[in-house]
Image: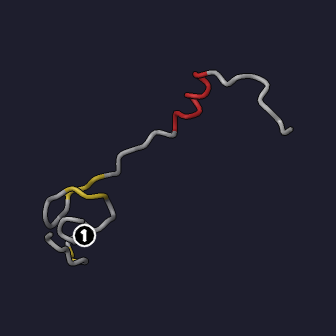
């Protein structure tokens, strides 16, 4: 058998270890072209522009 813990890890100790595991919201910025919010440093999914320049053609389905 391999090594096993000598003692039970308490709830508080377990939770302190997990304190940094929380999910965080992406940083949203306003699009220069259409005004919609999108993730920073990414092409706007609404209008397909990046830094005010049309980069991707967007289908309006």
Residue 4 or 54: which is nearer the viewer?
Answer: 4
Residue at 46% over, 39% down:
22
Image: 22 above or below 9: below
Circle 1: is it few (<14), some (14-19), or many (20+) Cα within 10 Å?
Answer: few
Image: 54 above or below 26: below
Residue at 25% over, 58% down:
38
Colouring of the image: secondary structure
Instruction: Please indicate whether residue 35 sits to the left or right of residue 15 in the image.
Output: left
Image: 41 above or below 16: below
Quarter of the image with the C terminus is bottom left
Quarter of the image with the N terminus is top right
Residue 33 or 11: which is nearer the viewer?
Answer: 11
Coordinates of residue 37 in the picture (x, y in percent): 21, 56
| Quadrant in which residue 44 is drawn | bottom left
Residue 26 or 11: which is nearer the viewer?
Answer: 11
In the rendered image, which residue does mark 1 sit on?
A: 51
Residue 30 or 4: which is nearer the viewer?
Answer: 4
Image: 47 above or below 9: below
Residue at 57% over, 28% down:
16
Instruction: Please indicate whether residue 46 sits to the left or right of residue 9 in the image.
Output: left
Residue at 52% over, 38% down:
20
Coordinates of residue 9 in the picture (x, y in percent): 67, 25
């Amino acid at each position: 058998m391999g090594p096993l813990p000598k003692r039970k890890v308490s709830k508080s100790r377990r939770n302190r270890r997990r304190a940094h595991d929380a999910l965080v919201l992406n940083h949203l910025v306003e699009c220069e072209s259409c005004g919609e919010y999108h993730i920073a440093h990414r092409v706007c999914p609404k209008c397909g522009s990046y830094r005010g320049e049309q980069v991707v053609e967007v289908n309006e389905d």
